[in-house]
Amino acid sequence: MLFIFNHLFLKYSKKYVIFWLVLSIFFSIFYSYFALEQAFSGKYIIQDDARQHVFWMARFIDPQLYPNDILADYFQEAAPLGYTKLYQVFSLLGIHPFLLHKLLPLALGLVATSYLFFFTLEILPIPLAGFCAATFLNLSLWTRDDLVSGTPVAFAVPLFCSFLYYYITENKVLTLLSMALLGLFYPQCLLVAFGLISLRIFRLHHKMIKFSAEINDYIWLLAAGLLTFLVLLPYVVFPSSFGEVITKSEAQQLPVFQAEGWSSFFSSHPFQYWFCGKRSGILPTDWCRFYRRGLELLPPQLWLCIILPIGLYVLKKFSFSVEPSPKKAIVLLQLAFVSLTLFLLAHGLAFTLHLPNRYTEHTLKIVFAVSAALLLVRFMLSILGKIPPKTQPLLATLWLFFIIIYIPMGYPLLLINEGYEFPSTDYVKGQYPELYQFLENQPKDSLTASLVPETNNLPSFTQRSILVGGSGYALPYHPQFFQEMERRTLDLIQAQYSSEPEKVSEFINRYGIDFWLLDKSAFTQDYIKQDEWLNAFAHQINPQELLSAQTRPFLEKNLNKCAILQADQLILLDANCLLKISSRAFIKKDS
């Protein structure tokens, strides 16, 4: 057993590198398989975030879709150029964006796995370390729904892993190319990459920081700086057609950014704000979610890094012939430093640099994955070298079980046993095929107004426009866009619960509504109390007060008269029918 362990686990040769690389890739594909199984388990299935970031790409197939649709226009403009062009190219090849977003996670997972494997080998030339790092990273990628979304954030870790590998191998051309791709797909990580290269010009000499005397370091900085400037220049030269980004002082006045808002950022609890906030915290949000449930659910790489001081103390006593390259291992510390610096800068400039969490969440997953792998392998080798020969086979077997079985299999099973989904996909399955088919057959410029959660699925499943969507659509980062979404929502609530026919008809005519989708229970107090979207606007308009202060709402009285389709609890009304009834009521009132 020890002979097998020493050769299969520790020896650095091409065949052993291939063995551990293939095993790393196997688990990446293994996790992806379960996501693919969900993605293709039905016709009407789409990932949650893709409902906003991918739906508009149906325009690549048919440019006439979503005409004058502010939602489609907003998300199209917000999409990074590289991300947009990738989907556009595949659309020209006949691959629909909705299909591509389901296939991308498999490919991106393989990219991240392969690059991090070889990046780790550059630091510690033991294939086992590469396997551990790649597996730790895969656990992080699949406990969150970023990778599986196929949205810009899905490219952050894979592209950054490629950047790290080319950077640590001193390949200038491919390093700059990977930086360009980062900027074209996920610009926040481009700033992190540039910050990392910027540290090359500083040297620690006799506990003092001095400028580097190497011309090559300044060439790196100049090339990286020029590329970063050129890639990010369009964001400055071509401002958003939806106006300036919201300022921190403006955001502090909006309920949507408070702790209970759908885009919560601010919090009165310092730990939540600085560490676990989905947008403001430094840590990956899935780690915080596990922490709240129980310490035993924290990922194994985090535990290994927590005990790193103990491990380092042990390793001072026991040495091994293969040590990490100090010059290359320092990249991990530098990456953590740059990420933290940009995190604090993003807080200070909120929301000019977008969200602070975006500068640490992805890079910390990489740092902890590689650090834990280095610690685990070095500690293991040191222990094996000091124990009696008779016990070495048993310990080697236990290490084998822990590394190949528990890390990639045991931890996911632990999460599943505790009620968590692994892999985390957040796929949404449409429950109303007859509704989708009906709306899909309507004119391409048709517009549906609704407050029900199912509205969020309609642009993707019907390829028809909606007046306003839920929290995933009403993003508050551009006041001009958000104010329009807010105005539309308030107008819709007012019209839906109004008893006056003229208010309903005025609303329909103002926005050009063709269909109105309702829940049959929408006009009950219990429904209003439980509806999160209605409660989010209760401080501005309260449907409960409208119901108690008025006679029956106009829509409620005409549900059966104008219904053109019913699907379980949902009922679709014909707006033209409502206009006709409203017109007759107005004439009758005048007479």
Image (cartoon, grey):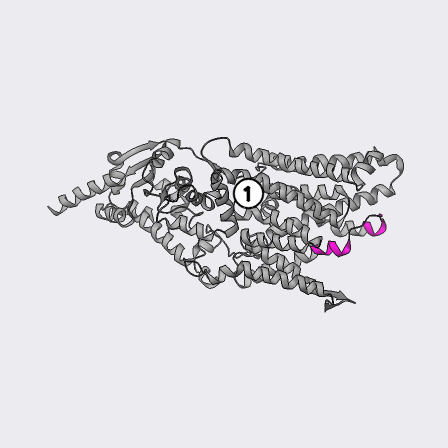
| Image mark count | 1
Q: Which residue is rendered at x = 26% and y = 41% of the image?
A: 575
x, y percent for residue 4: 82, 34
Q: Measured from the top left, where is residue 305 in percent x and y?
A: 71, 49
Which amino acid, mark 1? Asp
Disc 1: CA contacts within 10 A as few (<14), some (14-19) or many (>=20): many
- The segment highlighted magenta reads 315-332
Q: In the figure, is residue 212 to the left or right of 455?
A: right
Could you say which is closer to the camera, residue 511 or residue 109? 109
Position above or below: 196 against 383:
below
Q: Is residue 102 above or below residue 185?
A: above
Q: Residue at x 25, y 48 (%)?
A: 509
- Secondary element at tag 1: loop
Q: Is residue 343 magenta?
A: no
Question: Which sits in the foreground, 541 or 286?
Answer: 286
Q: Quadrant of the N terminus?
A: top right
Q: Position of residue 122 (x, y in %)?
A: 74, 49
Q: Above or below — where is 301 with respect to 484?
A: above
Q: Is residue 539 visible?
A: no
Is 285 or 228 nearer to us in this picture?
228
Pointer 1: what residue?
145
Q: At which x and y percent is residue 259?
A: 49, 53
Residue drawn at x 36%, y 54% is: 484
Give the quadrant of residue 210: bottom right
Name the residue located 75 percent from the left edge and 47 percent from the top edge: 375
Left or right of 167, for residue 3:
right
> Vertical placement of 211 versus 319: above or below?
below
Q: Is residue 51 left or right of residue 313?
A: left
Q: Is residue 400 visible?
A: yes
Q: Quadrant of residue 16?
A: top right
